[in-house]
Amino acid sequence: MALERRADRSESFGEALLGEVLDRAHELPPHLIGPLVTTVMTRLGGRRPQVLLQDYGQLLLAPLTGEGLAGGPPQVIDDSAAGRCFLDAVPVELPESDGVRMYLPLLDGGDQVGVMAVTLDGVDDDDRRLLLRISGLVADLLVTKHGYSDLFFGVRRSEPMSVAAEIQWSLLPPLAMIMPRVAVAGILEPAYDVAGDSFDYALNGDILHVVMIDAMGHGLDAATLATVVIGAYRHARRLGVGLSAIYDFMDRAVAKQFGLEHFVTAQMMQLDTITGRMQWVNAGHPPPILVRDHRVVRRLVAPTTLPVGLGGPKPRASSLELVRGDRVLCFTDGLIEEHERGGEEFGEHQLIEHVNRLEGSGRGIRAVTRSLSHTLKRARGGRTTDDATLLMVEWRG
């Protein structure tokens, strides 16, 4: 009997390039990610490699430092080729005098870590395929090594950060998650001084769990209160209890730790990502807004209970059947209670007008949420005297 013919297992050029990253990833110190990217890009014939990371305010893409990496000033997200790549999460090719400058999105679970850039003499489909795969591995490396070093924190900061904000950012999940059936995107202002606002989410099987909170007060007191509430929420969520029981866990945790003089408004949601059925409990929070066909169709006004910590009655969960493509926008009161420059309170009506205007662009949830926050801040004259947080959920069906 003839020997069965075996598949070719020799290493191709492309496999060798990807293997360069994979083989060294396990024990690679964070500060050597840059030199590794440089080595791989050089083997591909690339020049001036860059790794650009999003700053905390989501305004700039700042270059990571490292041997062989090109430096330069931060690039403005709203006014650069790197920014177009970042916002739309797609490669951008820019012809230059000495070749083609390629910008590749650094994606991890739908979250945009930043952008990788390199210049090649010319670009074909093989280059595009390899660069996309390499950028995916680099994004994974950045996320994995992030917890081992302060290097990336420093690159992403364009101004000093308060201690309260430091605590809040350490609590947060990734600002965006884009999955086939559901997407989530959030943003906090002021990014470098946020204290009492926070959010959390988890995709457990087919169920998306979401919470947004606004802790009373400012500074470290608010940050400490928010930390306890998010911790209690995660504990209850991981026990697998329902929304009413989650509220009770959070309520008792705050009352026990701080007494009845402290409270937190909260919005808790659970979304079945298969059926689109959403349930939510409102504890003294502004009602969320439903966006359908790129227009605000209603405020999700429903029975509420007292804010967390005040011993409110057992909340009753409200429910809604979402339609494919629906988006639900949650926000804290700092967004609508701010006063315009020399004028009246900003108000929900202006929020809705801006949502309708930006939704008409047809852009993805991450870009819309970011643009909405920055647009609203400009409309308030650049002022944020209270935390102002947005969180948007899209059921993709």
Image: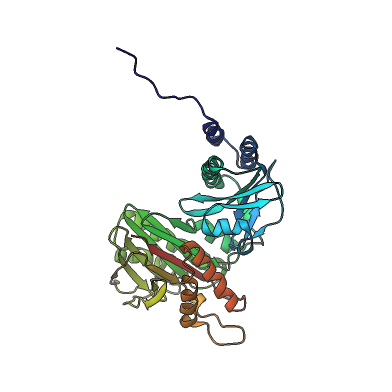
**Does residue 55 appear anywhere in the picture?**
no
Of 214 and 18, which appears nearest the observer? 18
* Residue 54 % position (x, y): 59, 56
**Does residue 328 appear anywhere in the picture?**
yes
User: Looking at the image, how many numbered discs can be counted on the residues?
Assistant: 0
Relative side of 112 to 290, left or right: right
* Residue 340 % position (x, y): 58, 83
* Residue 316 % position (x, y): 28, 72
Relative side of 67 to 185, left or right: right
Q: Is residue 326 above or below residue 2?
A: below
Give the residue displayed 59% in from the left and 66% down from the top.
193
Q: Is residue 7 above or below residue 25?
A: above
Instruction: Locate the N terminus by quadrant.
Output: top left
Instruction: Locate the C terminus by quadrant.
Output: bottom left
Of 40 and 259, which appears nearest the observer? 40
Q: Residue furthest top?
A: 1
Quadrant of the image occupied by residue 167 = bottom right
Of 296 and 344, which appears nearest the observer? 296
Colour mapping used in the image: rainbow
Q: Is residue 40 above or below residue 90?
A: above
* Residue 87 % position (x, y): 54, 60
Give the residue displayed 27% in from the left and 61% down from the top.
275
Give the residue displayed 56% in from the left and 57% down from the top.
86
